[in-house]
Image: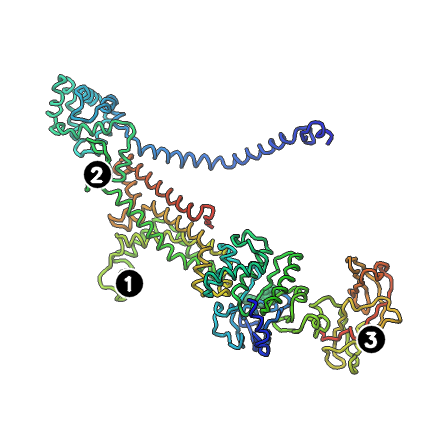
Amino acid sequence: MASTAETDVMMAADGVPLKIKLRRAERMRKIWALGLIAPLFIFIVGGFIVPIISLMTLSVEDPELNEALPRTAEIFSQWDGEGYPSEEAMLVFAEELSTADRGEFGRVSKRLNYDISGFKSMLKATARASDELTLLPADQILQGFIDIDDDWEDQAYWRAIKGASSAYSDYYMLWAVDLKRDGETGEIISVDEGRAVYVEVLIRTIEISFAVTILCFLMGLPIAYLLATLPTAKSNLLLILVLLPFWTSLLVRTTSWLVLLQNEGLVNDLGIWIGLWNEPLELVRNRLGVYIAMTHILLPFMVLPMFSVMKSINPWHMRAAASLGAPGWKAFLKVYMPQCMPGVGAGTLLVFILSLGYYITPALVGGPDDQMISYWIVQNMGRNANWGLGAALSLILLVLTMVMFFIYNRFVGIDNLKVN
Amino acid sequence: MTDSGHNRVAGANEPLVRFENVQKTYDGEILVVKDLNLDVERGEFLTLLGPSGSGKTTTLMMLAGFESATHGDIILDGKSLKTVPPHKRNIGMVFQNYALFPHMTVHENLAFPLQCHGVDKSEQESKIDAALAMVELTGFERRRPGQLSGGQQQRVALARALVFQPQIVLMDEPLGALDKQLREQMQIEMKHIHENLGLTFVYVTHDQSEALTMSNRIAVFNDGIIQQLDDPETLYEKPKNAFVAEFIGENNQLLGTVKDVSGDRCTVELASGEIIKALPVNIGGVGEKSMLSLRPEVITVEPGSDNSCDDIHTATVRELIYMGDHTRVRVETCGNEDFVIKMPRGSGGRSFDVGQDIKIGWHSQDCRALDAA
Ligand SMILES: Nc1ncnc2c1ncn2[C@@H]1O[C@H](COP(=O)(O)OP(=O)(O)OP(=O)(O)O)[C@@H](O)[C@H]1O
Ligand SMILES: [Mg+2]
């Protein structure tokens, strides 16, 4: 007490100023807290953030030509794209072709083949003869190229090389939305009709997700309401039925739908046996099958958040509404549903976002026109080994998800999100 | 809403609500309400009072329409309620937990019943303003229930139950969640609101002082049966049976056997041998058991010769508890160790010693001989 009067600084019993004591005590607590979150933090950074960032960079990189033929890339990027490139540029190109590493050469020819099919084989032939090309005098070099393949006369091939010359480009991003840069003018234009797929896939993905979300909502609402209002014993049984799908593998559930819905499947057999229809119905390998299977699989994600919110709604509110003169439907719409909104929001968001990324189910029970964006990501990342396009499509999926999230946050508020 | 006051005059001869032989069971085994016959008069403040589980809420819920009567009929304003759904009964209700709609503002909460009853917009506003003014919450329109204190929520609930001018307002322990001081304040306010509006209130509580403060009449429930239905004064001063005497206010009980009944007095012999004169209220014949009930405040300590006590006994002081305005003296007398006497401040209650023998007396008409429940 006496010391505080003299110095104005509060001292702890051992003479250390209180503030320093407090800071020390808090520092220990902070270190503890950091220590506790460190494993998860490192895991998230290493397993989530880093891959996503590298994926995002992949989608804007265009490195093949730069790596395989660096001098060509350099000199072609200075060409204005009018007429033919300079003879010097062609010479550098021929020189580098003759000395290129085989693996790198393979990648660059594949990349150029994306632009003009047939480019790959032409480039191969050119590379084989490149030694002779380098010996030609400058004014005959174009003729030399044309002698190897007539197509070299077409400026589009030369412009394709220029198009691939910068290390970063919007090439794959444009491709992912069925666009490209015009070789002559550099303007963004649509790709040829035959090659346009991804916008349709994107629309289809949103369409399927939307439909599945609506179906889940319509089917989940009464279930969640029952769960929340039935006596505990019955609602527990019902809850187990709802959760049951969670305990079975996704693949098993999907394939069992395949078994059930196929032409000789249980549903068709039953329908014909009862006499509801005569010919087997096409229930699977089409959009209907996708809707049925995805709705079934995603239903718990709709039911659980709605249930947990409904559970917390005071059951007396409905009685209060009735006593105030509201008939049942009005009480439900005006009093019950608005209070469910956080749960409905969480459920729809969850189901929509999960559906956006669905792959296995549409792949198994859908037809060729029912494949969603994930299918094409897998196709490009895997079979086509077109990482740039795969990454660009993934980025679109990510952005789509984030947009959904933003909309939700805007209208419902993320702090209202209640998932059990 | 003030115009409903005329009901009291217009239909004074006919009760607003009549329960006719109403029985209720939830499980088919136990009757929660056993043969209820109850008239609610127009404009009165009727309280259903009783211990937990005695069927008060059940009775209220049957009237509101949330539970159906297993047997019997409920008549509201001359019409059977059997086929009338809750939302068409025009009964206002205040729930124990208020049941305010959390997603609506105070204004929207009050507008809800008006919309349901098809009141047009301009009229709505004036009614809401009047209702909020009545509960002194003008200016709180934009708040949500979560931003109000318990007492304010209670007022909103009350305003909401009144704003659409129901024929009758039911309240199920509406003050249960408030602290003592606020509760007492609200009791007086609700009493005033009732007097000003002239509406019929049916109020449920298990707090007897609350019932005594507010009600015109009190129905004491126990075990699904109305034990007594009377105005507060009669109920307190002239309980008809041991349960009511015990439940309303404090009382000292002495168990004995009726020895003799003559005119307006009977004599009862206690197990400890004393013979006590009492007012026969609810006793069987001679030889039957009877419970004698004495309020603590009717006992006189050291009665003088001028006092009209006609029954005087010795008692041993066991405990003195100073309560401010009075002193509680616990004595042992007539075989009862928990015999309590209230001595007002200044009457010398503090001067006794524990263990001291004193004389106590009472007037035999204050000693009520009841059934030996
Ligand atoms: N929904 C129900 N199902 C089964 N039994 C019930 C139900 N509601 C009430 N009961 C039983 O009916 C009896 C009377 O209940 P009620 O709620 O009417 O009592 P109460 O007088 O309001 O009591 P409290 O003062 O505790 O509110 C109790 O024994 C209770 O257990
Ligand atoms: Mg109750």
Left or right of residue B150: residue B113: left
Residue B172's quadrant in the figure?
bottom right
Q: Residue at x 79, y 61 (%)?
A: B328
The correct choice, above or below, for A132 with respect to B242 in the image is above
User: What crowding class fits label 3: few (fewer than 14 Cα within 10 Å), some (14-19), or many (20 or more)?
Assistant: some
Res. B275 mark: 3
Q: Comparing marks 2 and 1, which lies closer to the viewer?
A: 2
**Horizontal and vertical percent position of residue A167:** 29, 27
Q: Where's ligand 2: which quadrant?
A: bottom right
Helix, strand or loop at label 2? It is loop
On screen, residue A335 versus residue A69, left or right, reads: right
Q: Nearer the viewer, residue A254 or A109?
A: A109
**Residue A233 visible in the picture:** no
Mark seen at residue B79: none
Q: CA distance from mark 3 to mark 2?
A: 115 Å
Q: Which residue is mark 2?
A: A191
Residue that mark 1 sits on: A270
Q: Which chain letter goes with mark 3?
A: B
Q: Residues within 10 Å of mark 1 (few under 14, many from 20)?
A: few
The residue type indicated by label 2 comes to: Val
Q: In the displayed structure, would residue B68 be above or below residue B121?
A: below
Picture coordinates of residue A73, whole percent (x, y):
24, 24
